[in-house]
Image (cartoon, helix red, strand yellow):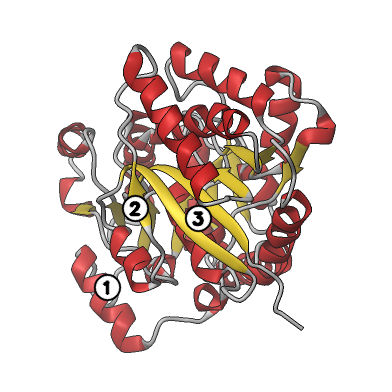
Amino acid sequence: MAAPERIRIVHVLDNLNTGGTELNAVRTAELLDRDRFEVEFVCLQPDGPLRQRLDSATIPVTGIRLTSFRGPGALRAIMELRSLVRDRRVDVVHAHDPYANVLAAPAVRLAGRGAVIVSQRWWRDVHAPLVRAANRMAYRFAHRVLANSPSVGELVVREEGVPRKRLVVIPNFVDDAAFAPLSEARRAELRSRVGLAPDDVAIGIVANLYPVKDHATLVRAAARVLERFPRARFAFVGEGGERAAIAAQASSLGIADRVLLPGRISHEAGLPGIFDVAVLTSVEEGFPNFVVEAMAAKRPVVATRVGGIPDAVVDGETGFLAVVGDDEAIAAALVRLLAEPDLRARMGEAGSTRARSLYHAGAVMSALTSLYASLAGRSA
């Protein structure tokens, strides 16, 4: 008896930079069973740090240029993807970000075959009005709209008008490596790279240095914490346009020597384990990988109560939640965790247990592959 034909999956992404959305897409492709699925990528910007991982996994990458939703270039890009879907007899196209959504949804419908999944992995006001309007139209074309947390899913139904029957909630995930503690040597090496001494008590954030991450609130909170714990260190891992502003603010508050800006570090499972406490002060979030990875690494999380963060962090159990911009509350939570090592340990254990139950790759990939299988063979 002949083996069943593999299900052909195309993932569509804007870029291959090291962001949460991009990492989740690449990890998904890496973990798909190649005996069951044939996998490839279409990227609007096909070169980036994550390209090497796809190449190593022998996952083909096709570049399709789309610089604007306006004008003939957008139509050309849609028709190029339409031809790819037809020529390669693609079963499911999975778009992971807003630009990918707008490209993939009409392309698959025009191809007349396959199914298209679009994604919402952000909260409200991250994108320009034109992008939001184009996404709203893409949701109408899609067979399924995938949200990466229950809160994001409710937002999609409530504010984007997506019928609940077309909504599917599948969270970001981590695999076994995220739960394994770093070796002492590797932990020391990474801490040294960030600028941490072996005996430093460290509060860490891993996020692009963008305004939406609101590092300014964390700098203000750091100044408060350092009044109680003057030897604490704050590591702002990431890169972006806010670097100079963060450095200037830390200098103006007299804490420049306590605030570390090591730049972007290649993603590594267990990285949050180099900190004692993980923190995220965003004003908008969908469902951030950093929070789940910190929980897996047994680190308590102090974060803002936005987007899908409360779906992961249980206030008072796995960490503490605060109102956006409330540096006083964030500082109070950090002070308490620094002052009570036993509490840090209990919250870290509770977070890891929760992450293993809800966000382990085994459970999440099972849900995702079931979704792909259910849509395969569907006429567009």
Q: Mark 3 and mark 1: span between their CA atoms?
A: 23 Å
Compare residues 327 and 271 and report the one nearer the observer: 271
Q: Give the SS element for disc 3.
A: helix
Q: Secondary structure at mark 1?
A: helix
Q: Using residue 218 as the reference point, say whether residue 158 is left or right of it.
A: right
Circle number at residue 360: none
**Where does residue 202 sit, x and y in percent of width and height?**
35, 63
Closest to the camera, between mark 1 and mark 2, is 2
Which quadrant holds residue 231?
Answer: bottom left
Residue 51 placement: quadrant = bottom left
Where residue 78 appears, as percent x and y from the top left, is 45, 28
User: Could you classify mark 3 by the number of other residues whose Cα lies within 10 Å: few (under 14), some (14-19), or many (20 or more)?
Assistant: some
- For the residue carrying disc 1, how many other residues have a C-alpha within 10 Å: few (<14), some (14-19), or many (20+)? some
Q: Say which amino acid is labelled 3.
A: Asn
Upstream in sequence: badge 1 or badge 2? 2
Q: Are marks 1 and 2 in contact (CB under 8 Å)?
A: no
Residue 190's disc is 1
For marks 1 and 2, give the CA distance: 18 Å
* Res 24 label: 3
Which residue corresponds to the image point at 76% horizontal and 36% vertical from the top-left? 167
